[in-house]
Amino acid sequence: MTAPALEIANLQRSFGALTVANNISFALPRGGRYALIGPNGAGKTTLVNLITGRLRASAGKVLLDGDEITALSQAARTRRGIARTFQVNQLFRGLTVLENVYLAIGERTNTCNRLWRSAGKETAVIGEALDHLEALALVDDANKQVRELPYGRQRLVEIAIALAQRPKLLLLDEPAAGVPSSESHLILDVISKLDPNITVLIIEHDMDLVFRFASRIIVLVAGEVLTEGSPQEISADERVRSVYLGERREDRQENRHG
Amino acid sequence: MDASRPLAPAAGRDESGAARTRALSFLARRDRYHVAEALPWIAALAAFFIFPNQMILGGQTLIMILFALSLDLILGYAGIVTLGHAAYFGLGAYAAALLITDLHWSEPISGLACAAVVAAIGGFFSGLILLRYRGLALLVLTLSTTIMLQQLGNLFRDFTGGYDGIPGINISPLFGRFDYDLYGHTYYLYCLGVLFIAFYVVRRIVYSPFGQALVGIRENVARMHALGSPVHWRLVIAYTISAAFAGIAGALFAQTNTLVTLGVFDFDQSAAVLMMLILGGAGWLYGGFVGATLYMVLQNELAKMSPEFWQFGIGAILIAVVLANRHRVFGKLVRRVRALGFGAKP
């Protein structure tokens, strides 16, 4: 039997007295479509940061394809095939859309080590960047500065950058956050068409999106895994209803842009 | 490049193909040389013939342009804000000076190379530590590194001459043929040639994939980390290259002034080059040209008017520039200039 794409074992992280990740364990099989849900402050983004290495774990292990990566830097983990999108856009706002994706590919292929050749002559990198933009219908915006784009399109650039990293494991941190509902179907279209070989973990507050996309759901509450199951099991789970779904109904309005 | 090689997709996707071609040519053309880019060089050559009596000032201006260019690479492109760039200017100046006075090697071009290597080594090792920090911490660290270097020079007075400096730096004729006149004509052309080559090199770097990554670090370092970029190494390499060019500027300064003192490490030097770059605009390669020329000419003219208070004028103009920048007064102007084809900000 092959090792899971991602395995987390007893992961722990505290900020002083505050434990934001407590004894978290789960495994994602290769090509899995998992959602991570939980109320605000449950530690979902923290968990993404622990997986990507943006934060170091206080204890526990992270394994990618069976290899332990707990001690590796964020850059090293990225090079092993972990990519993420950010809850709040982290884009190169003053650069064009094409240049944004160019950098993702340039860093992946080490093209960015070259300091004598013109960036415009790296046709392989540009061609691949354009392929990614084409897949997300962003080609027409290729020469526009990211800051000129409407927010919904910027969210697509976030995804384009992550896909250009050719990840094995993709962590989507609220990809539809802040996107007007008229445009959120664009995001859903894109993530429902992701390469089945990519293992995906999505954090999302939009339950419609979660139920449509994910085959398994992990519920995180106060830094701990409350339960894991299929969408049917989760929606039928009384505990989940009480801590999560009920609460969400109340603060859905105010936290839409969470 | 082989622009003819089609990246456009197969038939049936013509519209998208057109968009692809547009996007591709935008990136490919970004670093094309434009006629307007010849202007500063034509102006520099014209100055040689129009103001033959001002060539000492002219040479010093070219040196400061080179110094500002070196700063632009790290500040304008990589977003490294430093108040200690004089350290590498000073290292270069002393390397060039000591090579002549202590080692009796007076050939100027190899002197520049030696200065570049010394400054680059300094830049590399200081950069390894300094560039772990950003913002205010980096400002203070770069500032204090330069002060410490200056005091180190003061400590080893026998070697460096302390604040009295190293006199009698006389370089042998350029290419073994062209001797130096009292009016600074040879020096001017020498500096102009060096600046031209440096400019070409920095321009190549800025428009390379590496240069693109530097801009990425400036724009969003968190994303660069997430992309797996070796951010620290990229910065160290850029800093080392920048230090090398600052060192060459310092060496030219030593060679043309025949005297170097520890004053080259003064905070004033670091501040002045920063002001020049901001005056001319950081991150578009020509900021040094505009800013250093403006600064040096103003300094010269204002000092004639008021030998004591000339810095007041510089300060006032700098404030005006920064405020105007903030309120986007130059936005339109810059776009017009860009439309003429001066290097677009990558």
Image (tube, coloured by chain):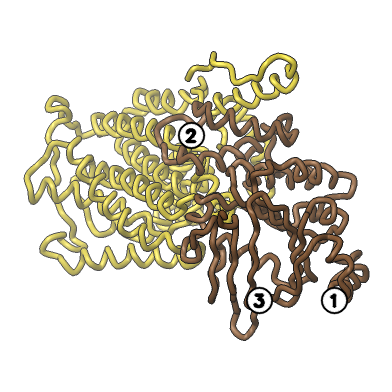
Chain colours: A brown, B yellow
The residue that appears at 40% across and 47% down in the rendered structure is: B238
The residue that appears at 65% across and 58% down in the rendered structure is: A28
- To the question of a shared chain for discs 1 and 3, the answer is yes
Kindly identify which chain the residue marked by label 3 belongs to: A
Q: Where's residue B83, x and y in %?
A: 42, 59
Closer mark to the observer between disc 1 and disc 3: 1
Q: Where's residue A136, x and y in %?
A: 73, 36
Q: Is residue B92 left or right of residue A257?
A: left
> What amino acid does circle 1 point to?
Arg
Q: Nearer the viewer, residue A208 or B66?
A: A208
Q: Is residue A22 above or below residue B176?
A: below
Residue under label 2, please give it.
Answer: B207
Query: On residue A239, which mark appears?
Result: 1
Rounded to the nearest angstrom, the CA distance separating label 1 from label 2 is 56 Å
Q: Is residue A2 left or right of residue B305?
A: right
SS state under label 3:
strand
The residue that appears at 33% across and 43% down in the rendered structure is: B245
Q: Where's residue B42, x and y in %?
A: 42, 23
> What amino acid does circle 3 point to?
Val
Residue under label 3, please give it.
Answer: A20
> What amino acid does circle 2 point to?
Tyr
